[in-house]
Amino acid sequence: MKSATSFDWETVLDRLSAFYGTGDWRVPYLRDHAEDPFQVLIGTILSQRTRDANTDRASALLFARYPTAERLARAPLPSIERLIRSTGFYHVKARVIRACARTLLAQYGGRVPSTLEELVALPGVGPKTANCVLVFGYGVPAMPVDTHVHRIANRFAVVKTRTPEATELALRATVPREFWIPINPLLVQHGQNLCRPRNPLCSRCPLEELCPTGVARRLGRPTPRPEDRLPPAKPGRGSNSAPARRSVPAGPLSPPSILVSAPVGRAGHGSK
Ligand code: SF4
């Protein structure tokens, strides 16, 4: 994996935050219930391989009926399936979330654990879901990496990895801890809108001059060269690196008109 010690996360995240305004990936229902780690956990499992709107609809229906691990653990499967049908794969998801609720009840008295090791031992919970619970359920710095974060980190050339799991390890080793909470929602939002899997909209991106892929594409090259890499970070906060500079003057950014004209026709946070 490539070192990212000179990457200016502060400038990059500042620009994305200004561009998108909120940086909060969560669908409205989960955003309003973020204080409940149980609902964050189950909602994140539901969000796998579906769109945010479907997760939102299913979460609202499910938690109105079964708001706690105790209630969900005792729910009949057909009832759960009916409530979460909009998310797809609802037969499997219903079994998984009920098994997860039963494990919470049996092992933790219905509470959601707050360590990565305990979370990934729960049924249906992988590293990304566990990290989401830590960040969005408990406000604990963690590094949820889905396909968006994985793809964009590679386009930034701060990692050179083949899987989200490898990207998580690389980012945990190099990203200053103060950015662990905002990095996921901002990169997910960017991946859902401009930095799409195919044909990223680099010419509209607030990071074009900072991103090796954006620089390369502007110069007509399919892939970045070493000279396209980001300049070193400025000294102090947000970087592990030696003194450096900003390459692009800070300033107000245009409103993200693409969000207004073509909002979020996207897969959910947990997709893929
Ligand atoms: S410049 Fe292009 S590749 Fe780089 S972050 Fe922006 S949209 Fe993604």
Image (cartoon, rainbow, N blue to C red):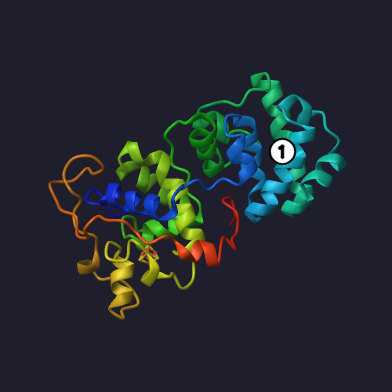
Numbered label tally: 1
Please state the quadrant of the image where ligand 1 appears: bottom left
Whole-percent x and y of residue 244? 14, 51
User: Residue drawn at (43%, 42%), measured in percent from left and top?
Assistant: 143
In the picture shown, does residue 198 fall above or below 140?
A: below
Which amino acid type is marked by label 1?
Answer: Ile
Ligand 1 within 8 Å of the CB at mark 1: no
Q: Quadrant of residue 110?
A: top right
Residue 101 in sight in this render: yes
Q: Residues within 10 Å of mark 1 (few under 14, many from 20)?
A: many
Whole-percent x and y of residue 52? 63, 52
* Mark 1, secondary structure of its residue: helix
In the picture shown, does residue 253 fall above or below 238?
A: below
Residue of label 1: 97
Between residues 206 and 192, which one lies in front from this camera angle? 206
Between residues 22 and 73, which one lies in front from this camera angle? 22
User: Residue drawn at (64%, 31%), measured in percent from left and top?
Assistant: 38
Whole-percent x and y of residue 101? 71, 30
Residue 161 in sight in this render: no
In the picture shown, does residue 109 fall above or below 185?
A: above
Between residues 172 and 54, which one lies in front from this camera angle? 54
Q: Quadrant of residue 62?
A: top right
For the N terminus, the image quarter is bottom left
